Amino acid sequence: MCHECGNRYRYLGLHVWKAHRIRTEDYRAKHGLRRTGLVAEDLRQLMAANAARTMDDRPLFVARRSVEAAKQAFLALEVPHSPAGKEALRTALAGPRPRKFHSGNTCEECGATFCNLQRRQRRFCTRSCANTHNRRQRA
């Protein structure tokens, strides 16, 4: 969940850069987030599976690594959450909530709500909806 706009994304790091022009390191520091991946769980699992496949080529690394030592080093960081980060976590853990969108972001063709990532206001959620609308207007 984005702490800037409140929407949910599969790859939050990409959204934060494109929509808010904030680097992921600055985003984490601003909202008190630890060094975790800003990706959805299913995408994280896919990335972990890909990484596990590449570990077969690095047996010395696998033999010497210590998962417990890495966990203890991570927990020792104790990065505090910002007030906005704590509020976002509290809201997210409270259960499902309706998604927030910027006002006026309803597609004129299909009625779907969408997040406008561009600086100018858009009337349609996709180019397909815009084309359908334009064809209907010409007919």
Image: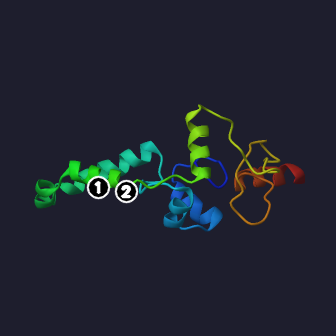
Tell me which residue sits at (83%, 54%) in the image: 134
Q: Which amino acid does label 1 sit on?
A: Ala
Tell me which residue sits at (60%, 51%) in the image: 83
Q: Is 126 located above or below residue 18 in the figure?
A: above
- Which residue is labeled 2 in the image? 77
Q: Is 27 located above or below residue 102 in the figure?
A: below
**Can residue 7 be seen in the rendering of this structure?**
yes
**Can residue 2 be seen in the rendering of this structure?**
no
Residue sitting farthest toward the top: 95
Is 119 situated left or right of 70 in this image?
right
Tell me the tag on residue 49: none
Tell me which residue sits at (11%, 54%) in the image: 63
What SS does tag 1 mark?
helix
Tell me the tag on residue 73: 1
Q: Tags 2 and 1 in contact by the CB under 8 Å rule?
A: yes
Q: What residue type is labelled 2?
A: Leu
